[in-house]
Amino acid sequence: MPAFRDFNFKLLVIEKLMYEDKTLTPAFSIRACLRARGVNDAESYAFGNGLAHTVLDEARAHFEALEISEELLATVDSLLVDGGHRVYQECAPGWDGEDELFDVGSLDDLDLLPNLRQITGIHDCGLGIPFKAEILEARGISAD
């Protein structure tokens, strides 16, 4: 199975496959995970334990271990960069989008997406993502 180097880039791919396309199943739910531990309100749990701006251990462990096949990765032709992604709420239920928690730090994982042709939102989201035009253009990827 392909290995991602940048956890936050992997989250963008998971958002596309799991929550948008619904082809990576089952969809992860931090609320269900916490309910199994007796926690009824994920957001209150995050805020009450000083974890609102942190990826919860349960979510990090799940998404880091999640294997995505080459076949499924080949279906990714576009990505959306947006602070409102569901995957971010599953990772950090209290996150408000006002920090760099989910900033992508590397484009090395582009190699895992052979059919990626478009990345939307890189200029509008304010996530500090290092998507350089020359890198994307060299790969035939358009960006806005």
Image: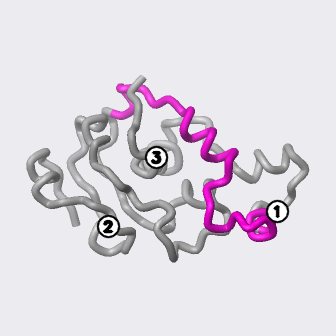
Q: Amino acid at mark 1?
A: Asp
Residue at disc 1, secondary structure: loop
Left/right placement of residue 131 relative to residue 58 reads left
| Residue at mark 2 | 121
| Residue at mark 1 | 41
Which residue sits at x=36%, y=34%?
73
Q: Position of residue 130 (x, y in %)?
A: 27, 61
Mark 2 vs mark 1, CA separation in Å: 31 Å
Observer-side mark, 2 or 3, equals 3
Left/right placement of residue 58 relative to residue 6 reads right
Range of magenta residues: 44-73
Q: Main secondary structure of the magenta part?
A: helix
Tell me whether the residue at label 2 lies in contact with that at label 3, contact meaning CB atoms closer than 8 angstroms.
no
Q: Quadrant of residue 33?
A: top right
| Residue at mark 3 | 7
Mark 1 vs mark 3, CA separation in Å: 26 Å
* 103 and 79: which is toward the camera: 103
Q: Amino acid at mark 3?
A: Phe
Q: Position of residue 97 (x, y in %)?
A: 52, 72
